[in-house]
Every structure is written in structure tokens, then in C-alpha cells.
Image (cartoon, rainbow, N blue to C red):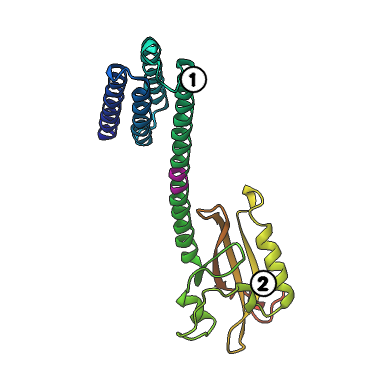
């Protein structure tokens, strides 16, 4: 934390020093009107470059307003020597004000853009951490964990998912739809509706779904599907999905979940 503060103070000092030198240069420069105007334009380029590297609004505004006053004041005080100048003092003041507004607007726009980029990176980092945490938790209770995009398409190749579906090592799961392996076509629509409805509010960011899935050999098994929704760097919905083969069943010969020996008691 301390080095960051020291660097910020140093940058402020350097920027203030540069702007002070520009103010002195424009005040003590040539009194010839056209030369003064050309110097103002050239120094404006330097001010833009300096302002692009420094974004503390109050300091930036202070020095550029001070420069504008120094430039306009110098031009006005020596207006009697500007008989050959193409720009009158009041017109020169308008030009300076326009340059001041454009400079501050450009710096503010650039500052907002960089702030948005930083916030996007922070959100992406936070989302990535949440995604990894969800994958770790689902990995503890599920056989396979895959990531789906907003179209419910598998984002990356997952060897465990390929092995579960008996696809073979040469077949990539990237770009496949999870619901395309459902044995019941009606379940596909139910799954899509269920997933798209999830995440409408904070109470439904996670959920479960049950479906029979069919592998490439035609074998069918019942799976519990656990899913967690999160947002990627672009704000689009993505899903971490865990698959666990559903093996919980009542013992044979029992309709209520208790075996016959326990019922005799």
C-alpha cells in the first residue's frame, strides 16, 4: 500500500512540475501574436500527452485552467503588439477555452475507459474464483464437471465427460450440447427451459435436474445434474454443471423404502 501512495505522490509532483514549466514558458515566450498562437498549439499537444498519463481530476483541472489563464492573460496584456496577428484577444480566449474543454473531456473519457477495464478485470477475476470454487465443490459429489456457455454448449473438451459417454479419446466434447444425450426428447426441452429460467433471481442461481442419458453405445443411465450459474467477463450467463449417476434406489421387494426384514419388526 505504501509504495503505491509514494508513486502516486511522485506522479503528481512530476505532472505539476511539467504544467508549471508550461505556464512559465507560455507567459515568458514571444510576444508576437502568431508565434504565441503556434506555441499554444504545440504546448497543447504536450498537455494532452501529460494529461493522458495523469488522471487525478482536480489536479488536472487546476493546472490546465491556470495554464489557460496564463496564456490568455499574456496574449491580452500584449495585445498592442499583435497588430499583425490573425487572431484577436477575445478570439484567442475562445480558442483556449475550447482546447481546455476538449483536453479535460478527452482525459475524463480515457479515465472512465480505463476504470471500466479495471472493473471488468476485477469482475472477471472474481467470477473466475467463484467458478473454480463451484467446480471444486461439484467435483466432490459428482462424477464429471463440465462448463456450459449461454447456449448450453460445452465450452472445453472434458476427457471425463467423453469417457462417461463412451465417445472415445479422439472425439472432443467441445461444442456438444449436454441435452443432446438425453434419452427422452421431452427432457431436452424441459432442461433448456429449466436452465434458462435459472438465475432470473439470486434464489435460483443453482439447482438440480434429473434425466436419463444415453451414451454412444446406446446404454442408458439416470443422472442427477447439478448446476451453478455465473457470468463471464462479457456479462453472459455460463453454467458449471456436475453429473452424478443416480444409483439411489429402494431395495428389491420393498415399496416403501424398508426391506421385508425390517417390516416384520
Does residue 242 lie above or below 53 as drawn? below
Q: Position of residue 209 (x, y in %)?
A: 64, 66
In the picture provided, is 231 more to the left or to the right than 204? left
Quadrant housing residue 107 = top left
**Is residue 176 something that shows in the picture?**
yes
Q: Residues within 10 Å of mark 2 (few under 14, many from 20)?
A: few
Residue at the spot 37% in from the left edge and 18% down from the top edge: 71
Does residue 108 lie above or below 265 as drawn? above
Quadrant housing residue 180 = bottom right
**Where is mark 1, residue-wise?**
91
Q: Position of residue 154 (x, y in %)?
A: 54, 70
Does residue 113 lie above or below 178 as drawn? above
Dominant secondary structure of the residues highlighted in magenta in the image: helix
Q: Could you tell me how far apart the alpha carbons at marks 1 and 2 are, in whole angstroms?
A: 93 Å
Residue at the spot 68% in from the left edge and 75% down from the top edge: 264
Q: Position of residue 194 (x, y in %)?
A: 69, 62
Report the front residue among 163 and 28.
28
Reply yes or no: does residue 68 show up in magenta.
no
Give the extent of the magenta segment.
Answer: 117-121
Quadrant housing residue 213 = bottom right
Disc 2 element: loop
Reply yes or no: does residue 120 show up in magenta.
yes
> First in sequence: mark 1 or mark 2?
1
Q: Which mark is residue 257?
A: 2
Q: Quadrant of the N terminus?
A: top left
Residue at the spot 74% in from the left edge and 74% down from the top edge: 186
Report the front residue among 83 and 133.
83
Q: Residues within 10 Å of mark 1 (few under 14, many from 20)?
A: few
Report the front residue among 36 and 221.
36
Amino acid at each position: 500500500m505504501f509504495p503505491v501512495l509514494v508513486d502516486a505522490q511522485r506522479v503528481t509532483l512530476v505532472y505539476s512540475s511539467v504544467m508549471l514549466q508550461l505556464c512559465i514558458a507560455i507567459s515568458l515566450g514571444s510576444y508576437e501574436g502568431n508565434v504565441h498562437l503556434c506555441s499554444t498549439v504545440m504546448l497543447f499537444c504536450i498537455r494532452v500527452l501529460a494529461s493522458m498519463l495523469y488522471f487525478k481530476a482536480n489536479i488536472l483541472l487546476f493546472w490546465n485552467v491556470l495554464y489557460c489563464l496564463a496564456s490568455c492573460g499574456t496574449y491580452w496584456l500584449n495585445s498592442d503588439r499583435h497588430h499583425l496577428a490573425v487572431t484577436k484577444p477575445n478570439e484567442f480566449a475562445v480558442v483556449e477555452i475550447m482546447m481546455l474543454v476538449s483536453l479535460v473531456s478527452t482525459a475524463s473519457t480515457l479515465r472512465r475507459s480505463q476504470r471500466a477495464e479495471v472493473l471488468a478485470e476485477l469482475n472477471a477475476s472474481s467470477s473466475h474464483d467463484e467458478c473454480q470454487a463451484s467446480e471444486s465443490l461439484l467435483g466432490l459429489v459428482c462424477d464429471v464437471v463440465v462448463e456450459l456457455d449461454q447456449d448450453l454448449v460445452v465450452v472445453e473438451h472434458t476427457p471425463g465427460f467423453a469417457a462417461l459417454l463412451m465417445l472415445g479419446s479422439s472425439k472432443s466434447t467441445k461444442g456438444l450440447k449436454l441435452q443432446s444425450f438425453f434419452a427422452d426428447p421431452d427432457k431436452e426441452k424441459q432442461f433448456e427451459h429449466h436452465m434458462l429460467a435459472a438465475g432470473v433471481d439470486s434464489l435460483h442461481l443453482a439447482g438440480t435436474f434429473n434425466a436419463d442419458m444415453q451414451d454412444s453405445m446406446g446404454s442408458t443411465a439416470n443422472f442427477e445434474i447439478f448446476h451453478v450459474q455465473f457470468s463471464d467477463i462479457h456479462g453472459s450467463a455460463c453454467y458449471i454443471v456436475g453429473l452424478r449417476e443416480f444409483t439411489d434406489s429402494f431395495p428389491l421387494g420393498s415399496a416403501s423404502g424398508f426391506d421385508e426384514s425390517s417390516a416384520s419388526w
